[in-house]
Image (spheres, rainbow, N blue to C red):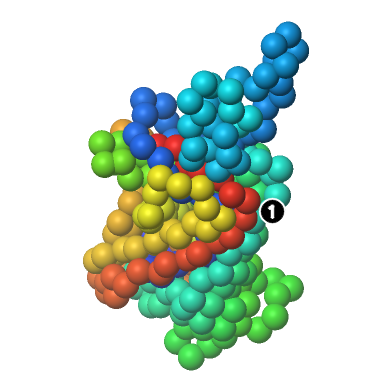
């Protein structure tokens, strides 16, 4: 019989968004902004932007700058990220431990990303290697994921990234010694975008954390609860074992953009 268990998320994943930074608070939901190069006014033959430089940090005194800050994703280039060791704690089963991970993806709008894929290596549990179908020994590959930015705390502000399957219901499927443990993970996972904010950058740092079997962030502010669940054929009752509560910090690199919050 298949059992369903809530997962404690601990150091789980390199899921990340690429080049983002947060700016001063605004009434709008968080979104990526680019410093766009303008065209001259056809009649006056002058630029009419607010900024004079390509990072939109120097204001034009006469509003004749060549650049303007606006929602956008730059050239839409792929981003890549890396993470160190990570654990996925399954209550009643134990930890699936991986030594490192890497991810890729791309923005498809100022608030969303798609084609996000994560590969974990050096994965094992209970002394057995874990791997996805067709992957190398100890290698877990996620399904194709999509992501969305949202407020964890609008007043602060604090922004997070919510990742879930782009199609279907599973984030990842893998086995750890087929005779003992077969896991399928569904739901979504939310990571916190860490400071520094308020400037353009090519790097973004996210943190994924859990404590006492509960993910630190289970929803966006005012949103529906959305967490991870595992389906397993490992037939044991939950033991109440809690995850270690450590955090994984992930750094991604991509285009120079700003997450305006």
Q: Quadrant of residue 226?
A: top left
In this view, the residue in front, 192 or 216, is: 192
Q: Residue at x 73, y 8 (%)?
A: 43
Residue found farthest to the top? 43
Q: Residue at x 69, y 53 (%)?
A: 78
Residue 183 appears anywhere in the view:
no
In this view, the residue in front, 3 or 83, is: 83
| Mark 1 Cα-neighbour bin, 10 Å: few <14, some 14–19, many ≥20 | some
Q: Residue at x 31, y 41 (%)?
A: 157
Left or right: 152 as drawn, with respect to 120: left
Residue 240 appears anywhere in the view:
yes
Q: Is residue 255 above or below residue 246?
A: above
Residue 143 at x, y percent in the picture: 64, 58
Disc 1 on helix, strand or loop?
loop
On-image quarter of the C terminus: top left
In this view, the residue in front, 181 or 174, is: 174
Q: Residue at x 34, y 63 (%)?
A: 209
Residue 111 at x, y percent in the picture: 53, 37
In this view, the residue in front, 69 or 9, is: 69
Left or right: 196 as drawn, with respect to 72: left
Q: Is residue 135 above or below residue 228?
A: below
Residue found farthest to the front? 61
Left or right: 120 as drawn, with respect to 154: right
Q: Which residue is mark 1?
A: 78
Q: Is residue 14 above or below residue 62?
A: below
Query: How many badges with numbers are in the image?
Result: 1
Residue found farthest to the bottom? 127
Residue 3 at x, y percent in the picture: 44, 62
Q: Is residue 84 above or below residue 107?
A: below
Residue 223 at x, y percent in the picture: 36, 35
């Amino acid at each position: 019989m298949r059992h369903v268990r809530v997962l404690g998320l601990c150091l789980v994943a390199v899921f990340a968004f690429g080049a983002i930074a947060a700016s001063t608070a605004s009434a709008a939901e968080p979104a990526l902004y680019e410093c766009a190069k303008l065209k001259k006014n056809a009649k006056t033959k002058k630029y009419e932007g607010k900024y004079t430089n390509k990072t939109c940090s120097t204001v034009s005194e006469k509003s004749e700058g060549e650049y303007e800050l606006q929602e956008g994703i730059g050239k839409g280039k792929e981003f890549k990220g890396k993470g160190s060791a990570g654990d996925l704690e399954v209550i009643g089963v134990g930890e699936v431990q991986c030594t490192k991970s890497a991810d890729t993806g791309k923005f498809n709008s100022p608030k969303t990303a798609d084609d996000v894929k994560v590969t974990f290596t050096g994965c094992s549990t209970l002394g057995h290697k874990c791997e996805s179908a067709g992957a190398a020994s100890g290698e877990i590959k996620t399904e194709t994921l999509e992501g969305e930015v949202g407020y964890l705390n609008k007043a602060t502000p604090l922004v997070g990234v919510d990742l879930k399957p782009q199609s279907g219901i599973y984030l990842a499927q893998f086995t750890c010694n087929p005779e003992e443990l077969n896991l399928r993970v569904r739901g979504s996972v939310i990571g916190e975008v860490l400071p520094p904010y308020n400037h353009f950058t090519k790097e973004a740092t996210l943190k994924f954390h859990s404590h006492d079997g509960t993910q630190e962030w289970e929803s966006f502010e005012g949103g529906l609860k959305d967490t991870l669940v595992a389906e397993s054929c490992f037939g044991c009752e939950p033991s109440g074992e809690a995850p270690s509560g450590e955090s994984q910090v992930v750094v991604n690199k991509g285009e120079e953009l700003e997450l305006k919050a």
